[in-house]
């Protein structure tokens, strides 16, 4: 007789030997990994690239097609990951993991195929996360959020307000620049875009976002901003903190949008907020949990790298103005990232691998960037 699907809730430690980890109909899963540093390790500034690559490599070992889809998909990715959280030692230039301390890492899946892949992966989970120069032992895997479906989220009970806490730097793209503010239209656009992509319950985007503009207001907020390195190239100015949104005017006249407003708020802990969520940005909790969003001291190396990338990108963009367009900016950002990381001491081979560039291409870009600076 087949084993009944478990009734699993947020905070439950997963029994990885169980036949079924969550109900078969599950479409959304949020996993928490408790990782232990056996020794004191130094994290390099862009270590989330390593977490991203390690995760996709894990999936590739048993489902190459799913790994390729998560890596190459041009639409929103059906997963996201966090950076590490826990107790660090901040030295003059680097972020230090402390020996014997436990660190948290989160992985979220947003579709049934991804959730199925996560379940299969957990059945053959290795003993450690093989992060470059900082292997971390996997002590425990638990549920950060209760497994659910899009239908269940669509039926959440509306409240009188909605609070969200942005626990890692969060940002949006607006007219080619970063917008480090939780402006309601941008926040709910980021959720709705993913909802329309994955939920099979499409909503008229423009009409709903116009409704958000008219009726969603700030009731309270406590925010901080910082510039960080994020993703494979470039820097981001993002915000952390908490915000409470309320509804004003005749919002109740459009009941389906009131419902959607709260549904998307409950979707946020699974899908994240803003861009570069597959590299640790935009991790979001439901409710006002400001202590979880207190920015940890940023290591000097990461701050210097972010500022240098931004400075170099501006310089190269100004040089490339005659070509214009997104392509020129992307090229400038790539040159800036390579040169800034070389100045910080990273090897060209490592940079090429993490930016997924042929070594000779990265070498050429490095030479061109140095020549452009000297010129």
Image (tube, grey):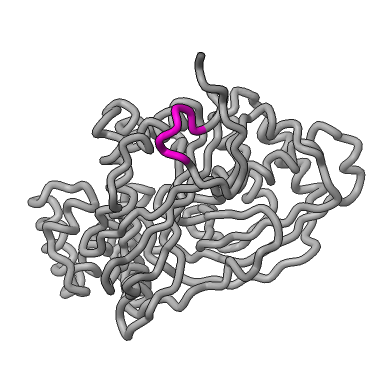
- Residue 143 in picture, x, y percent from top left: 53, 45
Judge whether residue 228 can be spotted in this image. yes
Percent across and percent down for residue 36 are 35, 62
Which quadrant is the C terminus positioned in? bottom left
Measuring 38% from the left and 75% from the top, which residue is drawn there?
A: 303
Q: What residue sits 63% from the left and 50% below the top?
A: 187
Q: Is residue 329 visible?
A: no
Q: Nearer the viewer, residue 251 or 168?
A: 168
Furthest-front residue in this view: 1
Q: Residue furthest top?
A: 1
Q: Is residue 19 above or below residue 226?
A: above
Residue 241, image x, y percentages: 62, 67
Q: How many marks?
A: 0
Q: Residue 304, located in which quarter of the rendered image? A: bottom left
Task: Quadrant for residue 70, please give it.
Answer: top left
Question: In the image, 180: left or right of 322?
Answer: right
Q: Is residue 132 magenta?
A: no
Q: Does 20 appear in magenta?
A: yes
Type of secondary structure dominating the magenta stretch: loop
Residue 56 at what x, y percent from top left? 31, 41
Q: Residue at x 66, y 45 (%)?
A: 188
Q: Residue at x 22, y 59 (%)?
A: 132
Q: Which of 117/232 is in front?
A: 117
Q: Residue extending furthest left?
A: 360
Against 336, is 67 above or below? Answer: above
> Which segment is the magenta one?
15-21
Pick whichever, 152 or 348, lies toward us. 152
């Amino acid at each position: 007789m087949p084993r009944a699907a478990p009734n699993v809730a947020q905070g439950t430690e997963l029994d990885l030997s169980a036949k079924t980890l969550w109900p078969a109909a599950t479409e959304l899963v949020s996993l928490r990994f408790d990782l232990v540093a056996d020794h004191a390790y130094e994290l390099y500034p862009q270590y989330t690239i390593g977490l991203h690559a390690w995760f996709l490599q894990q999936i590739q070992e048993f489902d190459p097609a799913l790994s390729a889809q998560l890596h190459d998909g041009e639409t929103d990715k059906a997963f996201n990951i966090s950076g590490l959280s826990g107790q660090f030692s901040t030295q003059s230039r680097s972020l230090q993991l402390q020996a014997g301390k436990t660190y948290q890492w989160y992985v979220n899946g947003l579709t049934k195929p991804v959730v199925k892949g996560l379940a299969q992966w957990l059945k053959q989970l290795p003993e450690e996360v093989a992060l470059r120069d900082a292997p971390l032992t996997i002590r425990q895997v638990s549920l950060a959020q209760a497994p659910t479906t899009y239908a269940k989220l669509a039926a959440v009970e509306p409240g009188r307000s909605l609070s969200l806490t942005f626990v890692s730097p969060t940002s949006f793209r607006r007219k080619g620049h970063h917008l480090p503010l939780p402006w309601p239209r941008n926040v709910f656009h980021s959720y709705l875009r993913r909802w329309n992509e994955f939920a099979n319950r499409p909503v008229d985007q423009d009409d709903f976002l116009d409704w958000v503009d008219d009726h969603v207001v700030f009731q309270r907020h406590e925010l901080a901003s910082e510039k960080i390195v994020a993703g494979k190239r470039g820097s981001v100015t993002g915000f952390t903190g908490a915000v409470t949104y309320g509804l004003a005017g005749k919002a109740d006249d459009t009941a389906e949008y009131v419902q959607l407003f709260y549904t998307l708020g409950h979707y946020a802990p699974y899908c994240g907020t803003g861009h570069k969520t597959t590299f640790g940005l935009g991790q979001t909790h439901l409710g006002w949990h400001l202590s979880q969003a207190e920015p940890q001291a940023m290591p000097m190396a990461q701050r210097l790298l972010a500022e240098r990338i931004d400075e170099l990108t501006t310089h190269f963009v100004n040089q490339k103005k005659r070509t214009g367009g997104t392509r020129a900016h992307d090229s400038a950002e790539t040159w800036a990232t390579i040169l800034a990381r070389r100045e910080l001491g990273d090897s060209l081979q490592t940079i090429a691998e993490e930016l997924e560039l042929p070594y000779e291409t990265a070498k050429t870009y490095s030479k061109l960037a140095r020549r452009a600076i000297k010129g």
